[in-house]
Amino acid sequence: AALHDGASAGVGATAVNMTGLEIVQNVIREIRSFVDQVYLPDTLAIAGFYKDWFRKGEGVGNFLTYGEFPSMGINDLDGLMIPRGIILNRDLSTVHPLELSAPDQIQEFVAHSWYSYTVGKDQGLHPFAGQTHLDYTGPKPPYAHLDSEASYSWIKSPRWKGKVMEVGPLARMLVLYASGNQEARTLVDSSLRKLGLPVEALFSTMGRTAARTLESKIIADAMQGWYDQLMANIRAGELETFNPALWEPSTWPAEARGVGFMEAPRGALAHWVVIKDGLIDNYQAVVPSTWNAGPRDAAGQDGPYEAALKGTELPDPAQPLEILRTIHSFDPCIACAVHLVDPTGEELLQVKVC
């Protein structure tokens, strides 16, 4: 019943029906046409005039992706279109495994952040044990500059096994390429060949911008296959969209912990929750711009933004366009990376769940 034109039956605009599905098909066609005829050729054409930016803004050389677009389930690693994994030191010969829940893998540090930990500012905490205690020690606003030897950011510093990681389209394209994905290899190699550049050129400001375009091509082409699978399932009578038993509160455990993760457009995104006595005991979010924009850690390692800016020359310091080009290549969202805080450090909101 949900698949007929539901207007006369009072079905809402968000209902799945054949009219809506045909709109989806047309949108997919338009997206693929735009990417093939405008986005990809324009990127390559413009990149040809800025080849020097394929040698700038390299950053840390380590890349992380949680993996995305599962065919059978998010934990079926073989069924992920974009693989889960780690690349270290720009070495595309090896994709290292990533285990999200292991306590020694992902940790957040606050050595140069305006937060404090009960275990001390030099220790890292896995998000399951994460803490968000405001501890502003900077100058009174407005201020002209910050002491970067002390705390200087409202962003934490995530690390994988103590190493700085860049996330985002470049990380995904590199993991695809390194894992042997034929479409990614063909697309990357042909694009670099047109520009007369080696694969190492991807580790750059312009490489991030190009990776965003190349990824769009891969995803846009995959969308048609996903749509065809959806239509085949509908014709076969497979209309279920979720398991209602898992949404029944009486089946939920009194104590549990879990993580929801995905590859957001800006990169690896995860929300971590610990439940005790049927209530949320701890909740931490580690978002893409936290990975990329986080400050130095206790070991003195720069975050991806800071590392990418090292050595940047400013012909006109009054108009630092060179800084903007590199930071914009990460597609930053600082609002995503910082917890909501009150200027005076006071609590903003309490939520009571009965």
Image (cartoon, rainbow, N blue to C red):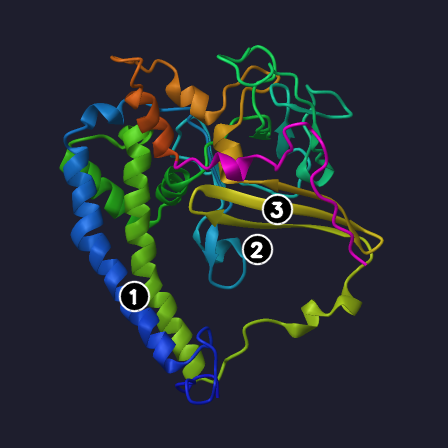
Q: Which amino acid does label 3 sit on?
A: His
Three-letter residue code for mark 2? Asn
Q: In which quarter of the image is residue 189?
A: top left
Where, quadrant-wise, is the C terminus in this rendering? bottom right
At horizontal 31% and vertical 40% (from top left) the residue drawn is: 211
Q: Indicate which disc, 3 or 1, sits on the residue closer to the N terminus.
A: 1
Disc 3 target residue: 271
Q: Which of 147 and 246 is in front in this view?
A: 147
The residue at the point 19 percent across, 34 percent down is 47
Marks 3 and 2, Cα distance to the nearest angstrom?
Answer: 16 Å
Which residues lie in the magenta part? 331-354
Q: Which residue is drawn at 20% across and 54% down?
A: 36
Q: SS class of the residue under badge 3? A: strand
Say which of 164 and 27 sits in front: 27
> Which residue is the site of mark 2?
75
According to the picture, the residue beneath numbered tag 1 turns out to be 27
Indicate whether residue 344 is drawn in magenta.
yes
Q: How crowded is mark 3: few (under 14 residues within 10 Å), some or many (20 or more)?
A: some
Q: Position of residue 284 (x, y in %)?
A: 66, 41
Q: Which of 271 and 134 is in front in this view?
A: 134
